[in-house]
Amino acid sequence: MAWSPAGSIVALIPLSAAAYAVWRGLDGALGRSLWLRFISVGLAYVAGGASYLLAAWLMRMPEIHEIIRGHPESAGAALHRRRYRPGA
C-alpha cells in the first residue's frame, strides 16, 4: 500500500521537470502575448502529464494499468470486454 503514494511522488519529478522545461522554452521563444502564454502553459501541461504517465508506467504502478486497461468494475471496461471479446 505504501508503494502507491511513494511512486506517485517519484513520478512527479519528471512531470515537473518536463512541464517547466517546455513552459520555459516556449515562453521565451513565443513572447508575452496572452494567447501565446495559453499555448505555452497548455503544452507544458501536456508534456508534464505525458511524462508522469510514462514514469508511472515504467514503475509499473497498478493505477496506471487500470487506467490503460480499465478497472474490472468500471463501465468502460465492460464496454471494452463486449467489443473485443476473444473469439467473437
Image (spheres, helix red, strand yellow):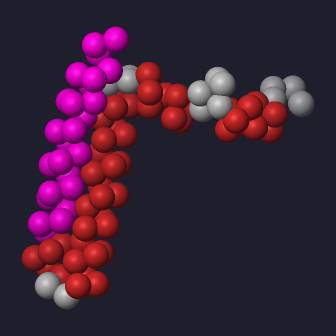
The correct choice, above or below, for 65 with respect to 31 in the image is above
Q: Is residue 84 visible?
A: no
> Residue at the spot x=27%, y=51% of the render?
48
The residue lying toward the viewer, choosing from 77 and 17, is 77
Look at the image and give the residue range highlighted in magenta. Answer: 1-25
Q: Is residue 4 magenta?
A: yes
Extreme residue toward the bottom, this view: 33
> Residue at the spot x=18%, y=72% of the render?
26
69 left or right, relative to 64: right
The correct choice, above or below, for 9 with respect to 37 in the image is above
Q: Most prominent secondary structure in the magenta stretch?
A: helix
Extreme residue toward the top, this view: 1
7 left or right, relative to 82: left
Q: Quadrant of residue 19?
A: bottom left
Quadrant where the N terminus sits is top left
Q: Is residue 69 magenta?
A: no
> Residue at the spot x=28%, y=76% of the render?
38
> Residue at the spot x=22%, y=38% of the render?
12
Q: Quadrant of residue 35?
A: bottom left
The correct choice, above or below, for 69 with respect to 41 in the image is above
Quadrant where the C terminus sits is top right
- Across and down, in percent, residue 36 comes to 25, 82
5 left or right, relative to 85: left
